[in-house]
Image: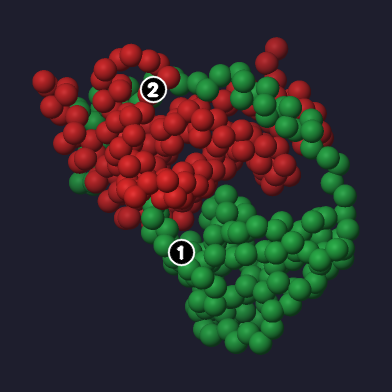
Chain colours: A red, B green
Amino acid sequence: MEQSVSALVLRARDGDLDAFGQLVTRFRPPFSRYALQMLGQREEAEEALQDTFLRAYRSLAGCREPARFQAWAFAILVNRCRTVRRQLLRRARRHSRDPDALDRVSVPHPEGDDAWREEIQRALARLPAAQREAFLLKHVEGLSYEAIAELSGARVPALKMRVLRACEALRRELSGVLHG
Amino acid sequence: MDELERTGADPVIQRIVEALRAPADLGTEVDRRVLAALRRLPVPRRGLGQSLVIGGLAVAAGLGAVLLVPGPPGPPEGTTPVRFVLSSSAASRVSVVGDFNDWNPTGTPLRRRGAGEWSLTLPLHPGRYRFSFLLDGRTWVSDPRLPSAPDPDFGAPTSILTVEPSAP
């Protein structure tokens, strides 16, 4: 029988790596999706995901509500993605005269060859990171603005504006593809 | 629902969101690497922290500062105690947010020490860190004594802290 998240967290806190492994396996897919969409590059998404789980394990004592492990670890992922994104930007600046090139890279989707999905990924990658983050958290991950504010440290009106701008940009870029 | 939230009901946005909600998985290799890394973790040892002091600091109202200070016995081996100090009588909560805590805005709160004085000592490994103070969850304050770096993505003013390796 599948153990509850709480039970696995409590076992992992006592040093049971197998229990933690089950948590990783359970939450890898939803976390993968966010990391891939936020970072746009598989290698960096893997790095963010691995760091997230390693840091979560080392900080398990700080997970005050074991049943809410997913939300707690997801907050770590959001911040890891920010850090990895900053590292990517720094690397891009060192190697390119055009740091914005990072936002124009073609992003392969793991699901493969669907043209519509590829267009979406390209449009998403061109959004400023703060807008992309707010859009994904609000509309794809389904978080409330208050929850996003708690995660990001940004204020709710600013987050609403980022989501609005993201929606406008995505609609502008993709309406033609959808109706064309 | 306000004007901004209605954007999500747009049919084009709905099609985009549907596609983005499709499963995407980085695969079981991630699990294997995570567990392999955890099995390699050494058992933490504890030792004395290196004492370094940067003195002569005058902290103005609302400004933050960082000091490398003598730490209490027992910081993790290889780390240097770094004291984060901020003076603000208006703030009701203050946290330090940076590379060392994955930019978690609530994970590392400073403690109020007296009238408007906030501080916290963290053991940090040698390295270069970007950080900022966050007041009441909404106002970002950098340390004016340290080099600053613009945050190209998220707009918060950030300072650059360099922690040197401890002397043997």
Instruction: Residue A20 in the image: state x and y as whole percent.
Output: 71, 28
Say the numbered circle drawn on residue B149: 1
In this orientation, does residue B147 appear? yes
Mark 1–mark 2 distance (CA, rounded to whole Å): 33 Å
B70 on left or right of A95 = right
Image position of A92 with respect to B15: above or below: below
Residue beneath the point at 54% across and 43% down: A80
Number of numbered discs = 2
Q: In the image, residue B5 lies at what x, y percent?
A: 26, 42
Please provide percent x and percent y for residue B55. 69, 83
Residue A114's place in the image compared with A7, above or below, is above
Asked if residue A154 lies left or right of residue B129, the reply is left
A2 relative position to A12: left or right: left
Circle 1: residue type: Ala
Q: Quadrant of residue A41?
A: top left
Tell me the chain of label 2: A
Are the residues tagged 1 and 2 within 8 Å (C-beta)? no
Report in which chain the residue with disc 1 lies: B
**Residue A23 shows up from this direction:** no
